[in-house]
């Protein structure tokens, strides 16, 4: 909604006015003239002014995070024009998304369902990294894989971490060894949005995007605040600092610098097993992004990140002098990583881009007296041609990926080095405003596996009443990359067994999505988003923990695997100041071999998430109540005598936060995490098997290497910390402060 009115002519030509919500003026709104560099922001009273304008016709745009953008075309003669806007809150559907089709498109127009999460969503439950923040996203679960070192991965629709591709600004710079590190250390103040695609995306992105992808999109430097700081701490002693600073150089280049520092140095053992409940960490990440102005508004951006982490967990008396020894057990990880990525629009009439990324990841770890030394390098480059012909929106691309991986484990007897060339094409055909069809395919040549082709098809129907139906079908693949810091092998007594020459995994997926958006004149917006999916896998590469508790056996499944389920989400924005995001996912992820079907390990049958917010406009204060609930999942036992439950209980993590924003440029927030004080120790006699004998000095083995029951080991166990499915941190308070200088 807008109100525009011409006023008396004055000497200076200007466009000015007030921007407000349904209840009050809205500060810090971006107001700019489309196609120019002329722009400003509203002050604390919601007032803006664009001065020094020549007579002409302009399109003025007002945009603010969490609100539907407004734009109005006006003609300016001599004098001033008053142009007021009323913005309505909306965090869900009108965003521009990229991940579904590799090109910017309004989310409602995309044939591929893409979920979008803005910084305002992550601020409802502040976390030191994006990895933890995803715990409140429906259908996505951060999975911790080790009680001692707390390394984890991201599950989408129940599929394990290797099936999730993590990207930054659309570049697949994270995979295999380093998945979680790509979601750590990015200052939250630099994130524009996080896009999530559930289901195979290999036809555009190649290997690793079998289960889905997470694309962390950072802010354009010119749209970022001049300076921002976010510092918070918890009663456990965690300290997290996010800083960002923007610098403009002669209107030709803008640089955005970000710094994230996280420290936790307080060993805690509340469950009494003499092991740290949470890994101690000292982490720093520096991010820099450049946006360079070119003729005809062609794109050129460069970004780089450096990441270093010193992380350890283990027996409470451990210190660095015990690193790598067999006296006191500890797991110590030194990680050094750098990334470089860029996007360059070619100086030609056609819309063509060259995109690239380079990463180097060095891992120096010890698990007790076992060393794990690994290095991974990935080089990626692709040319993209974005072409529209009549009702055909075409995309042509060619890519080249270089992979280098080496470690000191038996699973990598020699350096794994290969180059994978790719070709892909996509055609989105618009038959009418209601009907769209997307056709796409990708060809990859992997020297280890030969030719790989992955097609996909999508159909979108949009009714006049904003009912949106989308049907997607396609295939995915994942090349062999077995040993990517397999903690179950390193932290226990398990040997890695590769049973055969492994073939690439293939998946076949169909997904049906229904979206309904209801508008009301009062400004209320209610959105219903529901999906049903089925994915069938062949040549599945699964680690077999059950056949021999002292081995991890890798082979292609002699059978099949499947993931099927239903996901429902409700997003309500009410003019009274109340907002709600509620979601639930019901899924069944199983493997079938020799006519026997088995539930996938560490996969919940159902999950629910919620984020409820209420703002007291009069007091400039709002309350956020967030949480999740997970159903039982099958857990990794060490044998028939293992006394721990085979399935977890239903569990929930809930948080509450109060934020006050009545100061100029400042916000103060605080609250309580894990209100129910729930930890996985509540339903099991112990989490870490034989925590009192981490080097298996008192374990007796038979001739086959299996542990034998003895008086001091009646359950025939070996040391193993992989019985892990949830955070082991109990209730804790937190407090923080945010400062933003526009």
Image (spheres, rainbow, N blue to C red):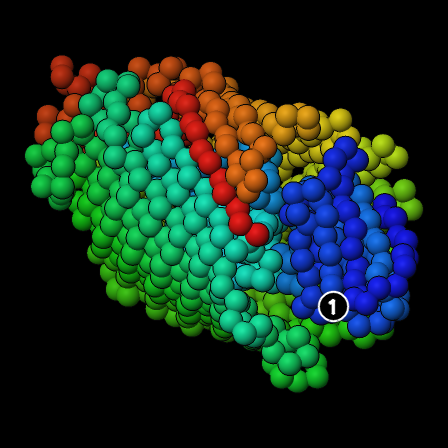
Coordinates of residue 601 in the picture (x, y in percent): 44, 33
- In the picture, the quarter occupied by the N terminus is top right
Horizontal arrangement in the rendering, residue 492 relative to residue 601 (left or right): left
**Residue in the foreground of this view, choosing between 120 and 415:** 120
**Residue in the foreground of this view, choosing between 644 and 550:** 644
- Residue identifier under label 1: 52
Residue 317, image quadrant: top left
Coordinates of residue 9 in the picture (x, y in percent): 88, 63
Neighbor class of circle 1 (other Cα within 10 Å; few <14, some 14-19, many 20+) is few
- Residue at 53% x, 36% y is 667
- Residue at 25% x, 35% y is 265
Residue 447, image quadrant: bottom left
Judge whether residue 443 can be spotted in this image. yes
- Residue at 25% x, 50% y is 334
Q: Is residue 408 above or below residue 614?
A: below
Coordinates of residue 155 in the picture (x, y in percent): 50, 40
């Amino acid at each position: 909604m807008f109100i525009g009115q011409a006023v008396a002519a004055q000497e200076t030509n200007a466009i000015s006015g007030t921007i407000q919500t349904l209840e009050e003026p809205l500060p810090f709104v971006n107001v700019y003239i489309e196609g120019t560099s002329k722009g400003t922001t509203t002050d604390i009273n919601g007032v803006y002014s664009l001065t020094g304008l020549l007579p002409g016709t302009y399109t003025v745009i007002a945009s603010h995070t969490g609100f539907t953008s407004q734009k109005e075309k006006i003609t300016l003669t001599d004098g001033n024009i008053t142009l007021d806007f009323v913005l309505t809150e909306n965090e869900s559907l009108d965003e521009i998304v990229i991940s579904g089709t590799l090109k910017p498109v309004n989310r409602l127009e995309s044939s591929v369902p893409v979920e979008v999460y803005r910084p305002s969503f992550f601020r409802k439950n502040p976390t030191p990294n994006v990895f933890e923040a995803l715990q409140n996203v429906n259908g996505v679960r951060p999975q911790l894989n080790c009680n001692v070192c707390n390394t984890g991965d991201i599950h989408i629709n129940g599929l394990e971490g290797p099936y999730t591709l993590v990207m930054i600004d659309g570049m697949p710079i994270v995979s295999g060894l380093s998945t979680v590190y790509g979601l750590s250390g990015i200052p939250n103040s630099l994130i524009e949005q996080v896009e999530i695609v559930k289901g195979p995306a290999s036809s555009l992105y190649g290997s690793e995007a079998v289960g889905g992808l997470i694309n962390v999109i950072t802010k354009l430097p010119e749209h970022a605040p001049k300076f921002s700081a976010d510092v918070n701490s918890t009663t456990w002693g965690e300290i997290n600092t996010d800083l960002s600073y923007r610098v403009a150089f002669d209107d030709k280049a803008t640089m955005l610098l970000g710094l994230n520092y996280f420290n936790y140095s307080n060993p805690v053992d509340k469950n009494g097993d003499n092991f740290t409940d949470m890994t101690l960490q000292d982490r720093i990440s520096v991010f820099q992004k450049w946006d360079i102005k070119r003729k005809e508004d062609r794109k050129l951006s460069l970004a780089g990140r450096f990441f270093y982490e010193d992380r350890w967990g283990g027996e409470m008396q451990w210190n660095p002098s015990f690193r790598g020894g067999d006296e006191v057990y500890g797991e110590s990880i030194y990680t050094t990583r750098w990334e470089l990525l860029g996007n360059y629009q070619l100086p030609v009439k056609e819309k063509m881009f060259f995109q690239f990324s380079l990463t180097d990841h060095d891992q120096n770890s010890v698990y007790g007296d076992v060393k794990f030394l690994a290095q991974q390098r990935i080089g990626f480059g692709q040319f993209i041609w974005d072409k529209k012909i009549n009702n055909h929106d075409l995309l042509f691309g060619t890519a080249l990926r270089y992979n280098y991986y080496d470690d000191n484990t038996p699973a990598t007897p020699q350096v794994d080095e290969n180059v994978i060339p790719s070709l892909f094409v996509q055609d989105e055909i618009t038959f009418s405003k209601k009907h769209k069809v997307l056709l796409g395919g990708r060809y990859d040549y992997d020297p280890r596996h030969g030719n790989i082709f992955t097609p996909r098809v999508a159909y979108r129907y949009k009714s006049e009443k904003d009912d949106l139906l989308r049907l997607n079908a396609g295939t995915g693949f994942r090349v062999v990359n077995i040993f990517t810091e397999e903690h179950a092998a390193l932290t226990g007594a398990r040997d890695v067994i590769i049973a055969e020459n492994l073939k690439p995994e293939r998946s076949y997926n169909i997904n049906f999505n229904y979206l309904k958006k209801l508008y009301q004149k009062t400004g209320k917006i209610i959105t219903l988003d529901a999906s049903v999916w089925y994915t069938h896998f062949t040549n599945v590469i699964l680690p077999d923990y059950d056949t021999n508790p002292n081995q991890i056996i890798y082979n292609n499944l002699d059978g099949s695997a499947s993931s099927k389920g239903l996901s429902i989400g409700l997003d309500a924005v009410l003019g009274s100041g109340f907002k709600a995001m509620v979601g639930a996912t019901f899924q069944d992820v199983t493997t079938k071999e020799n006519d026997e079907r088995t539930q996938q390990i560490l996969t919940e049958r159902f999950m629910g998430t919620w984020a409820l917010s209420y703002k007291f406009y009069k007091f400039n204060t709002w309350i956020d109540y967030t949480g999740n609930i997970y159903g039982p999942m099958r857990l990794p036992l060490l044998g028939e005598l293992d006394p721990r439950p085979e399935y977890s209980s239903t569990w929930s993590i809930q948080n509450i936060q109060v934020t006050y924003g009545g100061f100029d440029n400042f916000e103060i927030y605080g609250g309580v995490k894990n209100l129910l004080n729930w930890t996985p120790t509540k339903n099991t006699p112990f989490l870490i098997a034989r925590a009192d004998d981490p080097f298996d000095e008192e374990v007796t083995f038979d001739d086959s290497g299996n542990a034998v029951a003895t008086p001091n080991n009646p359950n025939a166990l070996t040391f193993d910390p992989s019985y892990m499915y949830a955070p082991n941190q109990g209730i804790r308070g937190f407090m923080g402060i945010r400062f933003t200088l526009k």
